[in-house]
Image (cartoon, rainbow, N blue to C red):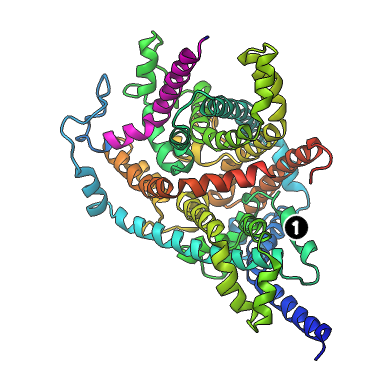
Amino acid sequence: MSRRWSSVLVHTVLVALTAATLFPLLWMVSASLMATGESMSTPPPLLPASPTLAHYRDLFERLSLGRSLANSTLIACLATFFSLLFNSLAGYAFAKLRFPGRERIFAGLLALLVIPAQVAMLPLFLLLRTMGLVNTVWGVVIPSMAGIFGIFLVRQYARSIPDELLDAARVDGASEWRIYRSVVLPLLRPILVTLATFTFMGTWNDFMWPLIVLTDDSRYTLPVALANLLGEHAQDTELMMAGAVLTVLPVLALFAVLQRQYIAGITAGGVKE
Amino acid sequence: MSTTAALTRGGRAEAWAGRAFVAPALLLIAVFFLFPVLAGFLLSLTDFDLYGVADPSAVRVVGAANYAALLRSSVFWRAFANTLVFVVVGGPLTVGAALGTAVLVSARATRLRGLFRTLLFAPVVATLVAVAVVWRYLYHPRFGFLNELLGLVGIEPVNWLGEPKTAMLAIILLAVWKNFGFSMVIFVAALQAIPEHLYEAARIDGANAWQQFRRITVPLLGPTFLFVGVTTAIGYFQLFSEPYVLTSGTGGPLDATLSVVLHMYKEGFRWWNIGYAASVAFVLFAVILVFTLLQLRLRPRGER
């Protein structure tokens, strides 16, 4: 097979696969702009006859999904902030600060990685219930404020920080906190962007834990609100698609901006394992 | 003050800082993860249920009774078998799709690699609940695009989510679409690490594209295969949201899409059979542990 033909073949297959992969997302956007009931005809239309934003208005005005949007944003931002703070402190300390038992504690943490999160969920729910945190933002945020994977990610990156740099700062009389704040954090910036993206998207997209902890629909995050909406409005395809767009658009936009860091984070964790 | 004294002093400050810096994260993990896991095991040995939620003093230790009940429960075995089908069929399909697309994306002839990689990756970052809602309509027996597509080649409409026979297949298709991009980018990175001169040498020796793939690419991807395969399997054992959204939280029709985690969720958080649900969680943990240990055993010697 000549080189030109193989190039045409590869690109044809790739374009077809990419189109098929994106089809559900594109159709979601298209159907969200259709008039009520328009998508439910044979053959199903690909594009709206006359695009309308009526369903989005409905979501905000009648079904108060704006509240869920605010809840999701608040929860994802809080989780991201605390995960950056606690994981960067711990990851840096495990990589660079010598203290007794450091390696043993870190090995213990890594061993905990084999335990699936679901194993902790029932007792965690009972624990948060006695703390009065069920059906609150903090009940959703607390379990993702520190994570073993995040600590691991920061530690691997922080190991490349030269000791001389830290020692020079110590000789200058800087406190350890000051060193972390003004020397280490700027150097960790790239991995912190990756960690922030992971945490934000992870908490935004999470379904099972908020579904368990949040009992009142005014507290729902978008995925929980959307699943709930499906119960009453399964027949309103176009409305449901508008809700789906509202839910995925923020993460897809964030991914479009930070895709390089995001994918780099995955391959760093995967290939070197 | 001598240098050694200053260093010891500095070392002590460093050690204290180290402890202080790891403390918040360790405390959070201990209180909100490790403690619940241990408590969960104890819970699984009790009859903690709705009455226990109201009055914890009424809870009794029942030993392994929950585990015995679970092994006798046909619903649990149904959920276990469904999950196993999802892992055994969905896993290889996902890894296969990931490898296929990764080879295409990294082919020498391919232009705009970064763009294809990013676009094919998009479903991975998309919110699962939202895309599951979308797929629910793509599976619609009358107006869904999947049946429309099948109709073009003369296949009768299928009631994807309404028939026990096809419901799990529908879940698998959604999962493959949602997840292949994740393994794909790992394969792409591993493919880029294979030295180009190996292929050149093979071409000089007259090897065709398939032979190059079979004799160079596949063996050198071995460790990546293992990693991707085991990660996918572990993730797939935790199947929950797909059947929850596609079947309105039931795992139907007729428990055909009930997964182990959905079973645990329904028992624990809907019926408050917390002791029993905790035992389901630990059985899941045991299964996942076996897979993880298998990965460690299969890993070539010399690696961590």
Q: Please indicate whether residue B40 sits to the left or right of residue A200 in the image.
A: right
Could you say where residue A34 lies in the image, as x and y percent from the top left?
Answer: 22, 34
Q: Position of residue B110 (x, y in %)?
A: 48, 26
Between B93 and A173, the one lying in front of the other is A173
Q: Vertically, is A45 above or below A154?
A: above
Q: Could you tell whether B255 is left or right of A240 in the image?
A: right
Q: Quadrant of the N terminus of chain B?
A: bottom right
- Main SS of the magenta part reads helix
- Within-10-Å neighbours for mark 1: few <14, some 14–19, many 20+: some
Residue B22 sits in quarter: bottom right
Quadrant of res A40: top left
Which x, y percent locates residue B181? 52, 35
In the image, is residue A243 part of the stretch drawn in magenta?
A: no
Q: Is residue A146 left or right of residue B147?
A: right
Mark 1 residue element: loop
The question of residue A11 being in magenta is answered with yes
Report x, y in % for residue A121: 60, 55
Residue drawn at point x = 81 percent, y = 38 percent: B297
Residue on which the image places disc 1: B61
Task: Specify the segment rendered in magenta.
Answer: A2-30
**Extreme residue in the left direction:** A50
Report the amino acid beneath label 1: Val
Write the residue at 54% across / 59% down: A192
Return the residue found at the far bottom.
Answer: B1
